[in-house]
Image (tube, rainbow, N blue to C red):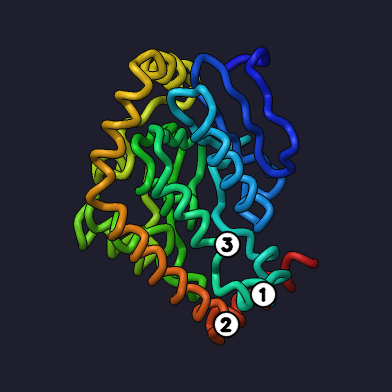
Amino acid sequence: MTDSAESKGGYKTILVTTKDKITKITLNRPHKKNALNLVMYREIQQALEEAAKDDSTLIAITGCGDYFSSGNDLYDIGKNMSEIQKTNGKWLKDLIGHFIDFPKPLIALVNGHAIGLAVALLGLCDIVYASDKAVFQTRFTQLGLCPEGCSSHTFPKIMGATKANEMLIFNKKITAEEACVQGLVTEVFSDSAFQGEVWTRLKAYANLPKNSLAVSKQLIRSGEKEILHAVASRECDLLVKRCFAAEFLNILKNFVQKSKL
């Protein structure tokens, strides 16, 4: 997409543009490897709400710089523990709910490393295109946490139980090619050709009948929606408990101390 794309302002952590019937949401904290803080959570939700109502045919989500996203911003979590406890993880439930319920085709363009929640959310996207330099890792148990983003349901369904267990329980890091073989990624492109090839394809998709695309997506997703919302609720409830468990609190303390050095 070019600079002539219509830019939608007012955001601090994301960039939102619309051109050629495509709304593009770019995670825009490159200095933090596009880590998701609570502000970004809310802004992604707002962008999805607006995109659901605008004239675009489909939505693409990508990252600015070398990372798609490094997942949740641990430093921001440390600063907002009281809100996490008070709301019982509503901030996460709301974000996941927006991905589950989004009515138009949602395409992830994984331009670089995808970690944690950023990987989990791929299971809720309709298509995932990746650069060959991208790597994928959850790191949930490495941080003393648990699966999120409906990955406890979507990953076993997509790649099979044992492969999912390697990623979700044992934090296995996989390449873009491996993610494609396992079904998490739709197609892999050379990094040098990634932007050109995926946008040519997306522009062609965007010229398909808009309502037909939306109805078809909703038909495919309809049988899973109730299940996905229930999974998201269970994961969020457990994640909040894990946020206040000694294992995670010790890891968070060490992380915050190192970030101050």
The tag earlier along the polypeptide, 1 or 2, is 1
Mark 1 Cα-neighbour bin, 10 Å: few <14, some 14–19, many ≥20 = few
Q: Position of residue 252 (x, y in %)?
A: 63, 74
Camera sees residue 66:
no
Q: Are marks 1 and 2 in contact (CB under 8 Å)?
A: yes
Residue 147, disc: none
At 39% from the left edge and 49% from the top edge, which residue is drawn?
100
Say which of 32 and 232 sits in front: 232
Camera sees residue 184:
yes
Mark 3 Cα-neighbour bin, 10 Å: few <14, some 14–19, many ≥20 = some
| Residue type marked 2 | Phe
Give the residue number, with chain letter if any, for mark 2: 244
- Classify 104 as above or below 195: below
Q: Position of residue 238 (x, y in %)?
A: 44, 76
At 40% from the left edge and 33% from the top edge, which residue is drawn?
104
Q: Position of residue 92 (x, y in %)?
A: 53, 61
Say which of 15 and 173 sits in front: 15
Give the residue number, with chain letter if any, for mark 3: 91
At 21% from the left edge and 61% from the top edge, which residue is drawn?
161
Real-space Cα separation, disc 1 to disc 3, in angstroms: 12 Å
Indicate which label's residue lies in the foreground, 3 or 2.
Answer: 3
